[in-house]
Image (cartoon, rainbow, N blue to C red):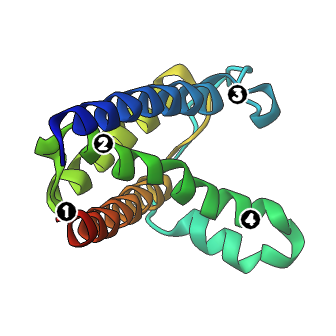
Amino acid sequence: MKIETAKKIRAVGIFLFTLYLILLIYFLFFAESYGRVSVQREYRYNLELFKEIQRFWDYREELGWSAVYNLWGNIVAFMPFGCILPVIWKKTRGFFRIFFLTFGFSLAVETIQLISKVGIFDVDDLVLNTLGGIIGYFVFAVCNYIRRRVYG
């Protein structure tokens, strides 16, 4: 790939990643439609692995789309993290690098939610968010493989 093309792709990637982070922060901490503007009186957290995932699965009929939205929303929300980050920062290209970066970023988000009492610290979210980052990385890896095969 020509250096000019690579620079343009990286610039677009930086723009998209910045936009993604702004939107993610907005929806996680400030969106009224997600109940993020009201600060809770007590700390809310779930430290039991798969508890909320199981609850959403068990009550999927009663909860309807909100169960699907919660589970898949966490995965989809972190896919751009795993997909765009390797485009703009070559050192992040690797399964374990993306795994730990996504987990660390998700842990930071969950910790801020706990400390600020906006949202809930949930270990299930850590699992789902990290899974989203990994899926995003696999999308990047497949696209990168195809690009190399087609364009040399």
Residue in front for this viewpoint, 84 or 120: 84
Check disc 1 and report its element: helix, strand or loop: helix
Marks 4 and 1, how far apart in space? 29 Å
Q: Amino acid at mark 2?
A: Leu
Q: Residues within 10 Å of mark 4 (few under 14, many from 20)?
A: many
User: How far apart in space, not on screen, are marks 3 and 4 (Cα)?
Assistant: 18 Å
Q: Earlier in the sequence, mark 4 or mark 2?
A: 4
Q: Position of residue 24 (x, y in %)?
A: 55, 33
Residue drawn at the location 54% of the way across and 27% of the way down: 25
- Residue 67 — which label? 4
Residue under pointer 3 = 36
Label 3 secondary element: loop
Indicate which label's residue lies in the foreground, 1 or 3: 1
Residue drawn 56% across the image and 31% down it = 43
Residue 134 % position (x, y): 34, 62
The residue under label 1 is 95
Which residue in the protein does label 2 denote? 85
Crowd tier of the residue under label 1, counting other residues whose Cα lies within 10 Å: few below 14, some 14–19, many 20 or above: some
Element on which disc 4 rests? helix
Which mark is nearer the camera, 2 or 3?
A: 2
Amino acid type at mark 3: Arg
